[in-house]
Amino acid sequence: MTKQKGNQQSTKNQDKKPQKQGVNIQIPRVAVPRDPLDANYTLSFAVNEAQEMKEFFDEYGFVVIRDVLTPQECTDTLTEVFDVLQYFEPQKCSWDRNDITTWNQWPSNAMERFGSPSRPPIFTRQFMLNRVNPNMHKVFATLIGEQDLIVSHDRCCLYRPTRNVLTSTGIQAKMEHWATAPNLHLDMSPWCYLSPDGPVATERELSKLRYEHTGSFIFENNQVSGEDGLLIQGVINLVDNYDEDGGFQCVPGFPKIFDEYFKSLAKQMNPNPLDELLNEKNLTGGFNFHKNDILNSYGVRVPLRAGSIVVWDQKMPHGSLPNQSSRMRSAQFIRMYPASQLREHRDRRESRRDCIREQLEKIQPSLQLDQRQKGLLDLN
């Protein structure tokens, strides 16, 4: 492990043209072990290897758990990803999952630059079943140390291949314009997390939610304060993913220096974001590292098998790298958190439950939930 000093860019919400700033702390460069049976993948653990899972997570800030979904569940989920692309706007979007020459077409509400077929969260049968899957719950409960959890509702991704792609002329070609944007970010405001006023500010923002639209679930995922304890995010992998396929990256070990890093950065910024917390730009729940930030050189790709989940501390800089292969990449995003964080908010909680019920009605009766599953959705 080597250590180097890092430079940090301000967020896009703070400056339109970020200026590089030195952060006078040591950033560890951490090597992550690969699977001894297949070095194409990051070392992973079985769902029941609780101690090994926790030890790896504590050391690196993330961990890969294999076989949380069956091959059939992966196939069914991927089918629903394609359904979003093919049927959301059939009159406007001519996407055909069986004809890669049509994959230039994306729905108007998609975020093509980031490989996201839908801006709102996905509410379909298999996506919902994945969220309440007992293996998912066991992974999050093991790491958080709490059984009574509530699951989030989030998006998915599909990275198209960019090499040897069959075109409408019958020629195989590079499709560089299909490559997603490389990125490194936090799904939280570091200033809100670190400030003594953060819990009050977060509480204020969350109490406003009434879930008139499903985008509120994305917003709630990113509202984090220092009083929330350990919070964990995850990506469920739907197809085997190799280094060159693009996908999840993170900066291993960063949660250990999170406080030191951002406190150092805050001292160098004018105005100091910890002193300007009431400014709305510091409460948006996201922090984006500039593409030229040296921290990007500390990012490590985490390739994993289909049916695996990678989970990480929400204080971990993470993101993705673009696809540079002839294979696609697809995944579902997920998060769980202690139920106590929601059940203190009666009005917000009832509005949230009403929104989930409304979405479930659209896929009933094909989806029948038991009491355990309803508990994870906070519908008991």
Image (cartoon, grey):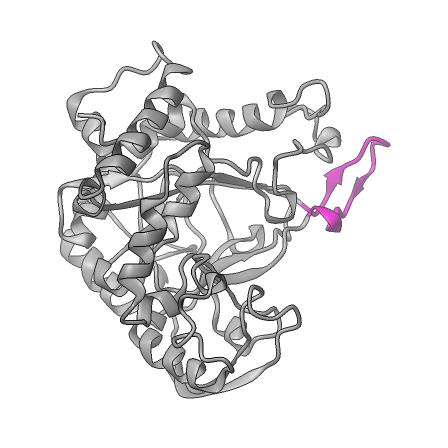
Q: Residue at x 37, y 41 (%)?
A: 209
Residue 342 is left or right of residue 193, and the answer is left
Q: Position of residue 13 (x, y in %)?
A: 56, 64
In this view, the residue in front, 52 or 79, is: 79
Where the N terminus falls, by quadrant? bottom left
Q: Residue at x 55, y 84 (%)?
A: 21
Query: Residue 212's quadrant in the figure?
Result: top left
**View extreme (right): residue:** 169
Residue 237 visible to the viewer: no
Instruction: In the rendered view, tell whether residue 99 sits above or below residue 109.
Output: above
Q: Position of residue 145 (x, y in %)?
A: 13, 52
**View extreme (bottom): residue:** 24
* Residues in magenta, as a range: 162-178
Magenta residue check for 149: no
Magenta residue check for 169: yes
Query: Residue 14's quadrant in the figure?
Result: bottom right
